[in-house]
Amino acid sequence: MSDQAPGEGGTTAPDHDEAHGGALGTRLNWLRAAVLGANDGIVSTAGLVVGVAGATSERATILTAGLAGLLAGSMSMAAGEYVSVSTQRDSEKAALAMEKRELREQPEAELTELTDLLAARGLSRDVAREAAEQLTERDALRAHARVELGIDPDELTNPWHAAWASFLAFTAGALLPLLAIVLPPAALRLGVTVLSVLGALALTGFSSARLGAAAVRPAVVRNVAGGALAMAVTYGAGALLGAAGV
């Protein structure tokens, strides 16, 4: 029961964005974010190293470009996620502070509001009122935070966790094309990288579809086609620049 306190057994369906319940929904969101972060690392780094490989066969040059792309991408992902989640956390804290002030200044109006919210979830008016009174007695702020705001005061979003998760997910994804392009012999380098990347993209497409309860086939096709297009475009650009002596 993601939007109600323990013992609030009469409430019905939770909000649509918490369909899996509190803890499970949070874990699934983190898993989806990790899969998408890894996917970004695979595609962006694969495009970069394949493009450089189209211009030169020098392993050191390809490795340097790949490492630079890995570090730049992972740091960018981490910084972006930190800023985004910090903003979300600030909004959550501001909403909780406002709710706390309203509970202090107009408790009866807030009790009525909680009753209305519970009644809107399918409880009869009398049962909703009784549940609202019991929840308010136990912990008014927690009750309003969960039912009205959809926030768990004990589990506010953590920007550092999000930043590290994005950094690690992107890095894990980026390592695959980087290793695939520098470890094999020059003659096999491109083929091994392309096959490895397309296989990994098929896996991340499958995983993201399953975690999001979406159709698997379209997700895999989109993922693989997008990665293949990115590598084809960057390889072509690298080959043209290499032929031009740039």
Image: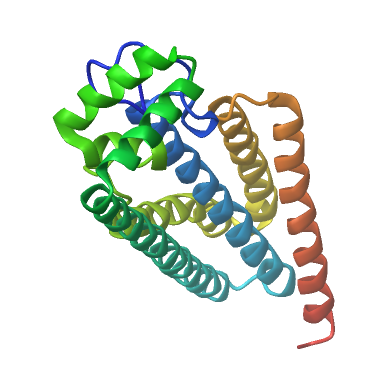
Q: Is residue 101 above or below residue 126?
A: below
Q: Quadrant of residue 43?
A: bottom right
Q: Is residue 28 left or right of residue 110?
A: right
Q: Quadrant of residue 207?
A: top right
- From this viewpoint, is residue 158 visible? yes
Near-viewer residue (119 or 164):
119
Residue 32 image point, x, y percent: 50, 39
Residue 213 image point, x, y percent: 60, 24
The residue drawn where x is 46% and y is 30% is 18
Residue 156 image point, x, y percent: 29, 48
Q: Is residue 165 left or right of residue 185?
A: left
Q: Quadrant of the C terminus?
A: bottom right
Near-viewer residue (133 or 157):
133
Residue 237 image point, x, y percent: 80, 72
Near-viewer residue (198 or 218):
218
Residue furthest out toward the left: 138
The residue drawn where x is 39% and y is 24% is 21
The residue drawn where x is 47% and y is 63% is 77
The residue drawn where x is 52% and y is 58% is 178
Q: Is residue 34 above or below residue 88?
A: above
Q: Quadrant of the N terminus?
A: top left
Near-viewer residue (68 or 164):
164
